Amino acid sequence: MMMQQSVFQTLADPTRLRIVEALAAGEQAVGDLVRAVDIDQSGVSRHLRILGEAGFVAMRPDGARRLYSLRPEPFRAIDDWVGSYRKLWESRLDRFDAALSRRQQDEGQK
């Protein structure tokens, strides 16, 4: 499975990553995010737009406010991508463990 490079480019920005971390606590208004990431509202709005275009963030109108929350799909895709490498390394480590166990048994029989 190929992970889109843009997913990582989106999260590589420190401000966007702080916004994602702030939204992990739950749905928040722009004002809450401005206080959480300590940049001005126009900056937060710009980063929210980028996160929204990349599929990380959903917006829900609530009267005059806009509430933002994380969407699970991109995080599932990242987890699946990392999981494929986890399986690769676990398999290699299992083979290494088996080889080490055989070697220890062989040395114990001498």
Image (spheres, helix red, strand yellow):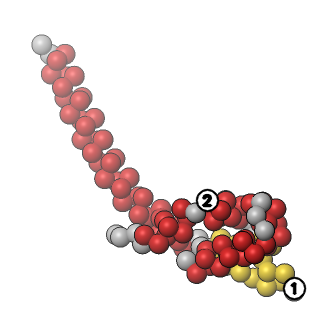
* 98 up-or-down from 58: above or below: above
Q: In the image, 23: left or right of 35?
A: left
Q: Which residue: 72% across, 71% down?
A: 44
As rendered, which of 35 and 72 lies closer to the eye? Answer: 35
Query: Can residue 89 be seen in this snapshot?
Result: yes
Which is nearer the eye, 86 or 34?
34
Question: First in sequence: mark 1 or mark 2?
Answer: 2
The residue lying at 30 percent from left, 41 percent from top is 93
Quarter in which the N terminus is drawn = bottom left
- x then y, percent, for residue 80: 43, 64
Residue type at tag 1: Ala
* Residue type beneath disc 2: Pro
Q: Which residue is mark 2?
A: 14
Residue at horizontal 16 percent and vertical 18 percent from the top: 107
Neighbor class of circle 1 (other Cα within 10 Å; few <14, some 14-19, many 20+) is few
Q: Which mark is residue 64?
A: 1
Q: Position of residue 10 (x, y in %)?
A: 54, 69
